Image (cartoon, rainbow, N blue to C red):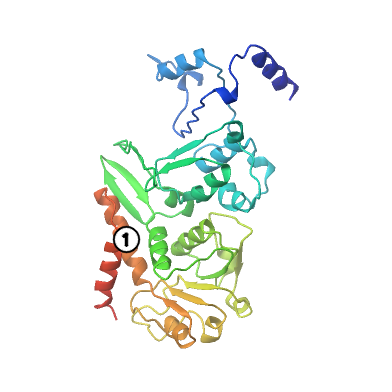
Amino acid sequence: MAKYDAEAKKINSERQDWQKEQTVIFTLSESFSDPSRLKDITLNNNPFPFITQLSKETTSGLMLSSGYGGGTANMEWQSLTGMDLSNLGATLPVPYTQLVNKQKKTPTFLNLFDEAVAIHPFSANTYSRLNVFEKFGFDKFHYIGSPDGLNYTQKIEANPYISDEAARIGAVNTVMLKANKLYGYNTDYFGIKVMLKSKNINVKNKTAVILGSGGACKAVITYLLDNEVEKIYIVSRTPESVNLNKIDKKISIINYNELNSIKGYLIINTTPVGMFPNVDNSAVSKEVIKNFDVAVDLVYNPTQTKFLQFATEEGKVAIGGLHMLVGQAVKSQAIFNDREISEELINYIYDDLSKDFK
């Protein structure tokens, strides 16, 4: 630290303007790098002359980043708080969703200024940015769908893209070919959100059980963590073989025998058990479902599975998978056609299909 203290004193001795008197624009770009710093690389010209000139006219330098190949939200957290991920345990890989929402105070770089504005050209739900940026103290937050809006929404035509949800979930279920580039998305996340929102299901500080550990399970886990669930139990017939792309202290993997002693708010079936033609089967017994307030079955054929029949008989909130199916399909069409589709249309399609699905 002595080295950096000495450099700071040197810079500050000649500084004319201080933080309160300055406007600081902080741009986080995963694709930004200076190829001239690489060995054995010769460039015909400067790839970013404006940045070079700007660095000569103001205080500038290099920042050591402990992340590589993504991790946008973690880079944001480290840069804005001055903290380093190495100070956190292995079970806390994403501070935005696991730490910040539970902190009473969150000191950040923003405390040095009278006003702070954030711009994120995507959904504010990813990594709980809406809640996180409010805690950080941003006065305004511009994102897709925000009250303040986004004035510039042009996309880079040939940029290979995997959506934030797909990257975090660790699974892609929708692929679009555009300009000879493949773009990967996960629409399960949106479908799950639509399905649970239709019944005003709030999982914050609640206990949830997920039956099965496949791709749909991963999307459910991500949605639940984003919405501040307190505890998640993943139930598998072979717990030792479950391989998740995220480690979180909120998650426990158990077998079906252990499930008998667990009570909670939400139980979700992500397995195909009960799907046509095996309509007389249920992933769990009625005695298990009694221990939960809400039962969700991702199976949509039939719409009223044996699993949901048990829940209805016990007076529980029962939600079938058709609403998720519609949400997924609509999200895919929105991606393919580069347009937003209203929630009203999603509900209209669901109501219309419900007449034909039995």
Secondary structure, mark 1, is helix
How crowded is the residue under tag 1: few (<14 C-alpha within 10 Å), some, or many (20+)? few
Q: In this rendering, would 208 be left or right of 318?
A: right
Asked if 23 appears above or below 11 in the picture, the reply is below
Residue hosting label 1: 343
From the top left corner, tell me how far across and down residue 300 is, in percent. Answer: 35, 74
Give the x, y percent position of residue 51: 45, 19
Using residue 43 as the reference point, say whether residue 355 is left or right of it: left
Query: Residue 320: x percent and y percent?
Result: 39, 75
- Which residue sits at x=64%, y=11%? 14
Q: Foreground residue, 319 or 116?
A: 116
Quadrant (top left/top right/bottom left/bottom right) for the C terminus: bottom left
Nearer to me, 279 or 326: 326
Q: Residue 338, position in %: x, y?
A: 27, 48
Q: Is residue 67 above or below residue 297?
A: above
Query: Which quarter of the figure is the N terminus placed in?
Result: top right
